[in-house]
Image (tube, grey):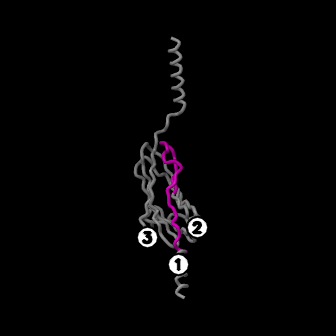
Amino acid sequence: MKKLYLTLALATVSAFSSAAATISLVTPDTTPYVGQSFTIDLVVSGNVQEILGFGLDYLVSTSAISLQSYDINPFFGPDFGLPDTKIAVFTFPGNTDSTVTLVSFKFLAQSEGVSVFSVLSELNGNEGLFTLTSTSDLSKALTIDVQAVPEPASLGLAAAALTGLAFALRRRK
């Protein structure tokens, strides 16, 4: 009988303990040009739990990039508007997809330079990634290096043409 209880206990623990999902900030380009718009997505991948909601704060370190807006995954519904948390959502039943984009942040590259975008969750009552069995930290940071607008190719082509013309005139003399 003890063996049966031990087997049941181990089965219960293994059912609730599973491989942790990966939380990441994803963007197609970490080196945008001044004036370029870009997005950064907060993504959960390798999910094996039921995600009920999440809460977080965010921070941009310098004015090289500016947050224009954000879109919460519509599955979770609208932001609750809690006073100490910038984004807080909850739904039941939750999302069981293996890969879930929680929120997409839209930015504008304002000026040349390096900026860090951070998502913060202090794991207080309103922050973190909430599943049926646990709360996980969402804190991540991503460095964005805004580049000067590149010289148009036509200017380089014109410079090459003038150099060739100057060389040809010099050769004639």
Q: Which residue appears at 56% of the width and 67% of the height?
A: 48
Q: Nearer the viewer, residue 18 or 38?
A: 18
Nearest to N terminus: mark 2 or mark 1 = 1
Residue beneath label 3, please?
125
Q: Residue at x 42, y 44 (%)?
A: 113
Magenta residues, as a range? 15-41
The secondary element bearing badge 1 is classed as helix
In this view, the mark in front (2 or 3): 2
Q: Are marks 2 and 1 in contact (CB under 8 Å)?
A: no
The answer to whether marks 3 and 1 mark residues whose Cβ atoms lie closer than 8 Å is no
Q: Quadrant of the N terminus?
A: bottom right
Q: Nearer the viewer, mark 2 or mark 1?
A: 1
Q: Which percent across, then down, holds residue 171?
A: 52, 14
Q: Amino acid at mark 3?
A: Gly
The residue identified by callout 2 is: 96
Between the residue at mark 2 and the residue at mark 1, the CA separation in whole angstroms equals 24 Å
**Point 49% across, 42% down: residue:** 33
The alpha-carbon separation of the residues under discs 2 and 3 comes to: 22 Å
Is 94 above or below relative to 59? below
